[in-house]
Amino acid sequence: MSRAFYRLATLLAAPGFAIAFAMIAVSGPAPRLLWNSSASAPVGLYLVHVGARARRGAFVAVMPPPRLAAFMVGRRYLGENVPLLKRVAATAGARVCNAQGIISINGIARSIARARDREGRALPGWVGCRTLERGELFLLNAPADSFDSRYFGPLSSRTVIGIATPILTRAAPDAPWRWRRDETAQTDEEKIDAYR
């Protein structure tokens, strides 16, 4: 093939690539698939809507801050560069408390913080009450041994990759796999109550 052919092909292909890149930039990030193997949320496949705003009741994929990530990797709670999958239990304005290991949100007991993990190692914790500020999220999953805000406190909403929608999950190792319908019709309270 001649040089003229390559020049012509380049001239024709370049605008196509430019248009494709512009469309990607305008349309926003594409959703990602995430496999959750942790029992702290239903095991299975999730669609992560990248950049979607976290709201109370939603599952979110979160990239933990470096210090927290290092702790979790060191304890083998999580692999390196693996996001967490957690439910948003409270947002800005909510009052969260840890009183002698009882975690409450706006005065309602929601969970218990354990002193030790399954291996008998001491778990980190925080005590007292605080009102969540703008951009803070309190993440809490239903299982009692979930490593979440009951131990590490609120996280910045900047750590959120996006909202995670279950596609194919199972609630327990011996439970059947279940295709999930769109749950957006449920209220946030119904989602939280259904998962407790």
Image (tube, helix red, strand yellow):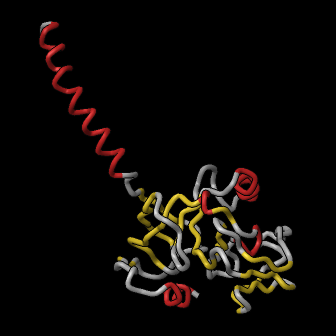
Which residue does the image show at 56% across and 67% down from the upper left? 85
* Residue 166: % across, % down: 43, 72
Query: Which quadrant of the figure contains the C terminus?
Result: bottom right
Does residue 12 appear left or right of residue 133 in this picture? left
**How many tags in the picture?**
0
Q: Quadrant of residue 77?
A: bottom right
Q: Quadrant of residue 122?
A: bottom right
Does residue 182 appear left or right of residue 85 in this picture? left
Which residue does the image show at 75% across and 59% down from the upper left? 75
Note whether 91 is above or below 75 in the view shown: below
* Residue 104: % across, % down: 74, 86
Please tell me which residue lies in front, 137 or 148.
Answer: 137
* Residue 58: % across, % down: 51, 75
Query: Which quadrant of the figure contains the N terminus?
Result: top left
* Residue 98: % across, % down: 81, 81
Note whether 9 is above or below 136 in the view shown: above
Which residue does the image show at 68% across and 81% down from the upper left? 94
Does residue 189 appear left or right of residue 17 in this picture? right
Please tell me which residue lies in front, 17 or 134.
Answer: 134
Which residue does the image show at 33% across and 45% down from the upper left? 24
Please tell me which residue lies in front, 102 or 167.
Answer: 102
Does residue 150 appear left or right of residue 18 in this picture? right
